[in-house]
Amino acid sequence: MKTIFEPAIRKELLDRVNKLSVHSTRVFGNMRPEQGLHHINEAFRLYLGEITSPYHGSALKAAIFKLITFSPMPIPREKAKTAPPLVSEGTYNIQNEKARFAGLLDRVASLPPTYEWPIHPFFGKMNHEQYGKLSYKHTDHHLQQFGV
């Protein structure tokens, strides 16, 4: 499974994000392209501990979510609910969000394996490897949402 801890994968994501525009066609979901990118950026801020969201899962739900997320199957479209701090319903400048993405991606990817990752709102306790994979899969999911 791909992870943001690999330089080639980060380059792939940056290249795809740079193809995103306000005119990108939405394939599924309700967000506009700049909202989707803002949402991804806020997820990175959550991973960095800059924003918080309480854990509101259970061991069983977390295990099921992890099983699906860390499998080869794609994240189900329009099925997953997001943590409230990650809801992006406002108006955002896509160029600013692209710049934020590059910086946040670099910051998350440079965290050492000893970093104390926050408890994820849905997945609970996760390790360095799992956050790297989740970061890729979540970003990929939303870039696919806009055909990039």
Image (cartoon, rainbow, N blue to C red):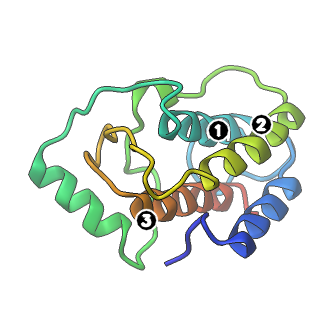
The quadrant of the picture occupied by the C terminus is bottom right
Of 25 and 108, nearer the camera is: 108
> Which residue position is annotated with label 3?
129
Of 68 and 4, nearer the camera is: 4
> Which residue position is annotated with label 2?
100
Which amino acid, by three-letter code, is at mark 1? Asn
Residue positioned 83% across, 52% down in the render: 20
Point out the tag, 3 or 1, that comes first from the N-terminus: 1
Point out the tag, 1 or 2, that comes first from the N-terminus: 1
Residue 76 visible in the displayed image: no
Residue positioned 72% across, 70% down in the render: 7
Which amino acid, by three-letter code, is at mark 2? Arg
Distance of mark 3 from mark 2, alpha carbons? 23 Å
Distance of mark 1 from mark 2, alpha carbons? 7 Å
> Which residue position is annotated with label 1?
41
Q: Is residue 148 above or below residue 105?
A: below
Q: Residues within 10 Å of mark 1 (few under 14, many from 20)?
A: many
Point out the tag, 3 or 2, that comes first from the N-terminus: 2
Residue positioned 82% across, 51% down in the render: 24
Distance of mark 3 from mark 1, alpha carbons? 19 Å
- Rendered image quadrant of residue 130: bottom left
Question: Does the CB distance between marks 1 and 2 fall below 8 Å?
Answer: yes
Name the side, left or right, on which 144 lies relative to 93: left
Q: Secondary structure at mark 1?
A: helix
